[in-house]
Image: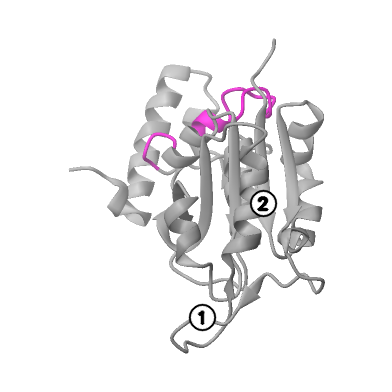
């Protein structure tokens, strides 16, 4: 069966952060299966001076440094000259908080650019002219956006058809149906007196599905009541 290839271009100040994660586990498997093509771009390669500066002080005297317009524009314009991109995403703590529906939607696209922030962020003109979507992974600040970019990439790539061998596994994850996943058990059925619920051992899949749905709702009510719709 042929699946559509997803291309992801990652732009970063510290691209070496990506190396170990992109070459491990699900992301490595997806690349080997030719289901995803991930290209990493060092923003310093698009600087215009011999010292490869990509940042400068902000106007108005604020503390910290900002990523300049020029290297980002040069990098993104070189990519968009080669192909159309469905989304150009900036990972930012003030973006929309990532949820499962975002990952689902992005997994159905063909070409994505993800820009990792750094320092105090990026020049606002980059956001105004180039960025189509801003995403946050939570209400906190990291030293750089590379880790946030990896979270987004992993959440998207694992959903691509053919990546996970059990086709139903990703569909049953927490948040796919707006609820937390029901408790899961494996062998042995009795470990030091801690037993697996009888319903899971009986083989009646209708009862098992009912039990899982009830457990999922109960778990969500206790741990994430904000997810339940009245």
Q: Residue furthest left?
A: 230
Q: CA distance from mark 2 to mark 1?
A: 21 Å
Picture residue at 37% right of the left edge, 56% below the top = 223
Pointer 1: residues within 10 angstroms few (<14), some, or many (20+)?
A: some
Measured along the vertical axis of the image, is residue 118 above or below residue 171? below
- Residue 206's tag is none
Viewer-proximal residue among 117 and 107: 117
The residue labelled by disc 2 is 75
Main SS, magenta residues: loop
Q: Are marks 2 and 1 in contact (CB under 8 Å)?
A: no
Asked if one can make out residue 182 in the rendered structure from this viewpoint, the answer is no
* Magenta-drawn segment: 160-179
Quarter of the image containing the N terminus?
Answer: top right
Q: Position of residue 106 (x, y in %)?
A: 51, 36
Viewer-proximal residue among 166 and 26: 26
Viewer-proximal residue among 47 and 168: 47
The residue labelled by disc 1 is 58
Viewer-proximal residue among 74 and 116: 74
Considering only order in the chain, which callout, 1 or 2, is on the residue closer to the N terminus? 1
Q: Position of residue 82 (x, y in %)?
A: 67, 34
Q: Position of residue 107 (x, y in %)?
A: 55, 32
- Residue 169: say if magenta: yes
Measured along the vertical axis of the image, is residue 13 above or below residue 35? below
Q: Is residue 135 left or right of residue 5?
A: left
Pointer 2: residues within 10 angstroms few (<14), some, or many (20+)?
A: some
Q: Is residue 138 left or right of residue 57?
A: left
Measured along the vertical axis of the image, is residue 23 above or below residue 125? above
Q: Residue furthest front?
A: 49
């Amino acid at each position: 069966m042929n699946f559509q290839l997803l291309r992801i271009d990652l732009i970063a100040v510290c691209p070496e952060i990506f190396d170990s994660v992109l070459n491990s586990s699900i992301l490595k498997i997806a690349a080997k299966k030719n289901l995803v093509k991930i290209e990493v771009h060092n923003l310093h390669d698009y600087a215009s001076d011999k010292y490869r500066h990509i940042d400068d002080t902000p106007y108005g005297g604020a503390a910290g440094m900002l990523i300049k317009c020029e290297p980002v524009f040069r990098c993104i314009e070189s990519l968009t000259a080669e192909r159309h991109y469905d989304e150009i995403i900036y990972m930012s703590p003030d973006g929309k908080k990532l949820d499962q529906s975002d990952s689902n939607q992005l997994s159905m696209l063909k070409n994505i650019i993800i820009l990792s922030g750094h320092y105090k962020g990026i020049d606002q003109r980059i956001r105004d002219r180039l960025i189509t979507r801003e995403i946050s992974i939570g209400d906190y600040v990291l030293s750089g956006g590379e880790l946030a970019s990896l979270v987004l990439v992993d959440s998207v790539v694992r959903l691509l058809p053919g990546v996970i061998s059990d086709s139903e596994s990703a569909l049953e994850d927490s948040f796919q149906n707006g609820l937390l996943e029901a408790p899961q058990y494996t062998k042995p059925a009795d470990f030091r007196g801690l037993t697996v619920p009888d319903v899971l051992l009986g083989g009646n899949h209708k009862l098992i599905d009912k039990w899982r749905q009830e457990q999922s709702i109960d778990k969500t009510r206790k741990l994430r009541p904000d997810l339940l719709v009245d």
